[in-house]
């Protein structure tokens, strides 16, 4: 039985902590109850902690919710792509994008992932130090543009990765601000945001022009598939929708994985026993043939990634807003009520994950299973991440290629500090020392 508990602390105190330290706020809320009411009056707000309550919201009553405030903010950058559309339009978009992540497609992408990672490894042969976050941002950007758009952005990697970072940072400023100023207001922040979007759009427009003139080159990519899609009226997708989906992939398809990998590299370096088992598995694996098939040889590497997703879920916060009044948990919730779910906090429930702050990949060894929605790194329900299998494949192959050639050591004496933006990244980057094996 799910219960709703009123928070004891004053509204202003809760709001200040949420805006100043969102991670600390949700960690404080987690043990207070299944669903915690913020007592916010006209627009009621709740923090959801229990798996049963999460199931009700993401599965049973999914049709009564929409993404709310996050959608309004993200639409400034990605427009009306898969990340921000609702209802029938979202269902239509998900249907035509889904084949991009079928097994046959992943088998093709695997080669590109390995080749792009080997290119980075070759460049790092002469390096002694690197910022692992920056390297992963550029690598995952090159992978997403090559696999989804059949485009080589190696000459513009840093510029494009910086533009993605700017759009994310500016979006978070808007998300945590109680007043959303229109994008047309010429503030310094809005102008910076617009310039970053323009940088990404320039690349997208160039790719679209080439794709329309040379469609055969894009046949097995997301862009190629979208160029063939027709709606119920037999019309092809407008350029605006193509742009929005490409922008969505640029932001959601690479920054999340880059952040996750940075956390994982830092944790492996802090746990010599994990690195030893990782190296042993990589050295003993049959890494021949299609890299997609390497996964069956690498169970421990995937356990490392799953534990990374537990401790540092890129989608650290999920918003849902009621589109209609709803009877749930024994009471009626009014239209407009906002529900916040934090996988970061939920994954630290000591009743589910003993010693929850410890990085322990054996939590995900064969046979270990967890109650549905006690572990939800890719969300759940109709809005769960469409690219989860791609992300797992990408992270696995990147780790394998790089750890086969290098060892990585942390240079800072302290643990990484989380920075909760749209995705959860390490604050101020993460410098590492690398040595060739």
Image: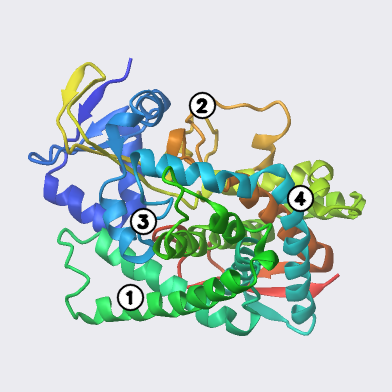
> On screen, 5 above or below 175?
above
Question: In terms of secondary structure, where does tag 2 sit?
Answer: loop
Name the front one of labels 1 and 3: 3
C-alpha gap between disc 3 and disc 2: 30 Å
Residue farthest to the left, as pictured? 42
* Front-lying residue, 403 or 185: 185
Of the image marks 1 and 2, the number of the one nearer the N terminus: 1
Residue identifier under label 3: 80
Q: Quadrant of residue 257?
A: bottom right
Name the front one of labels 4 and 3: 3
Question: In terms of secondary structure, where does tag 1 sit?
Answer: helix
Residue displayed at 51% across by 82% down: 159
Of the image marks 4 and 3, the number of the one nearer the N terminus: 3
Of the image marks 4 and 2, the number of the one nearer the N terminus: 4
Q: Residue 356, percent across and down? A: 52, 40
Residue identifier under label 4: 107
Residue identifier under label 2: 372
Which quadrant is home to the C terminus? bottom right
Of the image marks 4 and 1, the number of the one nearer the N terminus: 4
> On screen, 373 above or below 95?
above
C-alpha gap between disc 1 and disc 2: 38 Å
Mark drawn on residue 193 = 1
């Amino acid at each position: 039985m799910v219960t709703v508990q009123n928070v004891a602390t004053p509204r202003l105190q809760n709001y200040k902590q949420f805006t100043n330290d969102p991670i600390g706020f949700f960690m404080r809320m987690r043990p207070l109850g299944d669903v915690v009411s913020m007592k916010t009056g006209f627009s009621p707000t709740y923090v959801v902690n229990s798996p049963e309550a999460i199931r009700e919201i993401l599965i049973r009553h999914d049709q009564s919710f929409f993404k709310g405030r996050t959608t309004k903010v993200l639409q400034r950058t990605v427009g009306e792509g898969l990340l921000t559309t609702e209802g029938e339009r979202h269902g239509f978009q998900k249907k035509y994008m889904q084949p991009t992540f079928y097994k046959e497609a992943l088998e093709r992408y695997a080669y590109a992932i390995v080749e792009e990672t080997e290119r980075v490894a070759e460049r790092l042969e002469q390096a002694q130090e690197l910022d692992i976050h920056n390297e992963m941002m550029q690598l995952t950007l090159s992978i997403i543009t090559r696999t989804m758009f059949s485009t080589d952005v190696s000459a513009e990697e840093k510029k494009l990765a910086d533009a993605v970072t700017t759009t994310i940072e500016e979006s978070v400023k808007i998300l945590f601000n109680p007043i959303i100023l229109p994008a047309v207001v010429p503030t310094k922040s809005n102008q910076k945001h617009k310039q970053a979007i323009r940088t990404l759009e320039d690349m997208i427009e160039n790719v679209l022009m080439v794709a329309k003139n040379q469609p055969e080159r894009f046949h097995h990519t997301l862009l190629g598939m979208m160029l063939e899609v027709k709606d119920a009226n037999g019309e092809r997708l407008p350029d605006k929708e193509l742009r929005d989906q490409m922008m969505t992939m640029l932001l959601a398809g690479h920054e999340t994985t880059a952040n996750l990998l940075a956390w994982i590299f830092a944790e492996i370096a802090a746990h010599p026993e994990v690195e030893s088992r990782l190296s042993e598995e990589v050295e003993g694996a049959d890494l021949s043939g299609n890299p997609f098939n390497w996964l069956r040889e690498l169970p421990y590497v995937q356990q490392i990634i799953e534990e990374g997703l537990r401790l540092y879920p890129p989608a650290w916060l999920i918003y849902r807003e009621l589109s209609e009044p709803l009877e749930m948990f024994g009471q009626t919730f009014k239209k407009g009520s906002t529900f916040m779910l934090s996988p970061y906090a939920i994954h630290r429930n000591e009743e589910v994950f003993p010693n929850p702050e410890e990085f322990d990949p054996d939590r995900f060894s064969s046979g270990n299973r967890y109650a549905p929605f006690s572990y939800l790194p890719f969300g759940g329900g109709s809005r769960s991440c469409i690219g989860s299998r791609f992300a797992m494949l990408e992270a696995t192959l990147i780790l394998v290629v790089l750890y086969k050639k290098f060892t990585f050591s942390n240079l800072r004496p302290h643990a990484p500090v989380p920075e909760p933006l749209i995705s959860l990244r390490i604050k101020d980057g993460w410098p590492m020392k690398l040595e060739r094996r």
